[in-house]
Image (cartoon, rainbow, N blue to C red):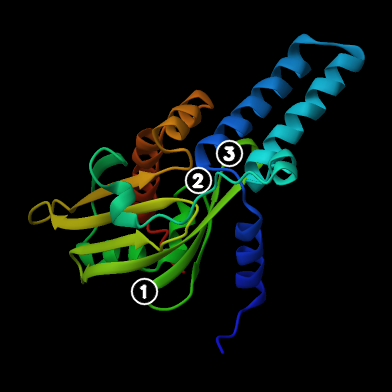
Amino acid sequence: MELEFPGDLQDRMARDRRNMNEVERWLSIAAGVGLATYALTRRRGVARWTLTGFGALLVRRGASAHCETYELFGINTAGTGQDTRRALGGSGGILVDERVTINQPIELLYRFWRNLENLPRFMRHLQSVERITDTLSRWHAYGPAGTTVEWSAEIINEVPNQVIGWQSIEGSDVVSAGSVNFDSAGAGLGTHVRVRLQYSPPGGKVGAAIVRLLGQDPATEIREDLQRFKQMVEQGITNR
């Protein structure tokens, strides 16, 4: 019999309650944020708080992926978990490819990045990365409207001081795969760091478009993350 830890049990129970697909989830969150914003900025009196309340309910509905009306009528559009390769194949994924040159040796940069718990120190969208084993980790990221997105990832390709490659585990909220490459820029010129990330956000490309409307652009975020990484390690702030 396989033991189930409390966190895993909560994750499974939450997934079992889901009856909305990812497009519906993100549309519900976006509609809720839009309705609440409209109410708070354009309406007054009872209508203001009534519409704000409806907006909050839509955000909660999308964040939990559970619709009471669907449950009442026995509707379930959630489907099953996606295989990472299938979800990202062809035009299914969103691709981000960014790079930066850092005036530090490869060994230091690789070692700092390989400790995945360091990543939230310069990646602002990450809340935390928890090491489970040497190759498995659990990630928590900030989502829209105060939500949190969680997924587990596995390192599938690693060459010390050259590359770290990973992909999400089937059933994760976010289906993703990516790599970070470290290459010498030449004697005394530092290191080229290149991050390639391909992902299928909740709601696919529709979800990605909604995220952009809410002011979040993954390519810009990764570019800014790499600049923070560069500043941090060039200033010698790497102890952890």
Tell me where residue 206 sits by quadrant. Answer: top left
Q: Distance between the residues labelled 3 and 1?
A: 30 Å
Q: Are marks 3 and 1 in contact (CB under 8 Å)?
A: no
Within-10-Å neighbours for mark 2: few <14, some 14–19, many 20+:
some
Inspect the image, locate mark 2, and give the three-letter code of the amino acid beneath it.
Answer: His
Within-10-Å neighbours for mark 1: few <14, some 14–19, many 20+:
some
Q: In which quarter of the image is the N terminus?
A: bottom right
Mark 1 = which residue? 135
Q: How far apart are marks 2 and 1 (CA)?
A: 22 Å
- Towards the viewer: 69 or 34: 69
Asked if residue 111 shows in the view, the reply is no
Give the side of residue 61 with respect to residue 187, left or right. right
Q: In this figure, what is the number of numbered marks? A: 3
Mark 3 = which residue? 25
Mark 2 = which residue? 125
Inspect the image, locate mark 1, and give the three-letter code of the amino acid beneath it.
Answer: Thr
Asked if residue 130 shows in the view, the reply is yes
The mark that comes first in sequence, 2 or 1, is 2
**Residue that protrudes farthest toward the bottom in the picture:** 1
Tell me where residue 218 sits by quadrant. Answer: top left
